[in-house]
Image: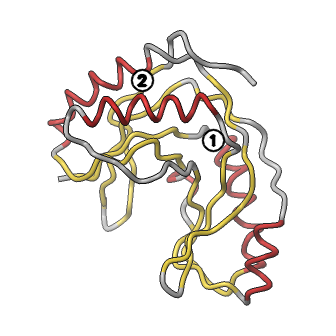
């Protein structure tokens, strides 16, 4: 069994931009587990645990979705965090993007027909660190106020991903990439 999800993956150039931004967050934290740059992604929908071989129906649904969307650009917004008990998850957010939300909604509605229910609000972000302990409350506020400098990213495909452990190391593997080739989309 593997954890399967649909994501937007970043090229090497953008992974380095994200890494540089993640490194800048270290001045605000005492400790945390920073995500390896090869794991940076934006989850479009988490599907859950399953055998990778059983993903054929999912692939058919993704094909139907990408046939409706043109490539589009994501703009990076700011750093933020989710509180988890006495620790936090650091992330880089995405400016609100209508095409991204429409793509996510299209995938979500079609996946419901296959039995994949995801009722959580969609909050597009890239996780950069887990189990973070901030230096103090002032550091939390300053992290959020801090600007970031990452150029826009052109999304021209989404990937069906598998999360697995190889030699006790977390790894994400693209099972298949799906090119956006349809009628909706924008380049702004």
**Circle count:** 2
Front position in the image: 123 or 87: 123
133 displayed left or right of 169: right
Q: Nearer the viewer, mark 2 or mark 1?
A: 2
Depth check, front residue: 1 or 165? 1
Q: Secondary structure at mark 1?
A: helix
Q: Image point 56% across, 59% down: which residue? A: 127
Q: Which residue in the protein does label 2 denote?
A: 178
- Please provide percent x and percent y for residue 95: 70, 44
The quarter of the picture where residue 108 lies is top left
Q: Residue at x 37, y 64 (%)?
A: 169
The 10 Å Cα crowd at callout 1, few under 14, some 14 to 19, many 20 or more, is few
- Taking 3 as reference, is 11 above or below it? above
Task: Indicate whether 90 appears above or below 151.
Answer: below
**Residue in view at x 47 percent, y 15 percent:** 68
Q: Using the image, tell me which numbered label, if any, was put on residue 137.
A: none
Q: Secondary structure at mark 2?
A: strand
Q: Residues within 10 Å of mark 2 (few under 14, many from 20)?
A: some
Q: Give percent across and percent down for residue 188.
A: 75, 25
**Residue 160 in the figure: left or right of residue 7:** left
Image coordinates of residue 146 in percent, x first then y, are: 83, 65
Q: How is the image coloured?
A: secondary structure
Q: Is residue 77 left or right of residue 39?
A: right
Which of marks 1 and 2 precedes in the sequence? 1
Answer left or right for 128 relative to 153. left
Determine the CA span between mark 2 and mark 1: 19 Å
Q: Residue at x 22, y 32 (%)?
A: 113
User: Which residue position holds label 1?
Assistant: 12
Instruction: Measuring from the top left, give residue 128's x and y in whole percent.
Output: 60, 62
Give the answer, above or below, for where 24 lies relative to 148: below
């Amino acid at each position: 069994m593997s954890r399967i999800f649909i994501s937007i993956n970043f090229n090497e150039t953008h992974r380095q931009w994200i890494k540089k931004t993640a490194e800048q967050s270290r001045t605000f934290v005492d400790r945390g587990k920073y995500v390896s740059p090869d794991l940076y992604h934006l989850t479009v929908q988490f599907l859950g645990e399953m055998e990778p071989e059983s993903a054929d129906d999912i692939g058919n649904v993704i094909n139907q979705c990408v046939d409706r969307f043109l490539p589009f650009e994501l703009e990076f917004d700011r750093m933020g965090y989710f509180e988890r008990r006495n620790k936090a998850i650091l992330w880089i957010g995405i400016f609100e993007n209508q095409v991204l939300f429409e793509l996510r909604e299209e995938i979500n509605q079609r996946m419901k027909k296959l039995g994949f229910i995801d009722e959580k609000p969609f909050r597009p972000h890239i996780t950069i660190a887990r189990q973070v302990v901030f230096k103090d409350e002032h550091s939390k506020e300053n992290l959020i106020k801090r600007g970031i400098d990452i150029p826009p990213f052109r999304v021209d495909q989404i990937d069906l991903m598998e999360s697995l452990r190889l030699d006790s190391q977390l790894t994400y593997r693209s099972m298949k990439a799906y090119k956006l080739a349809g009628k909706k989309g924008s380049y702004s």
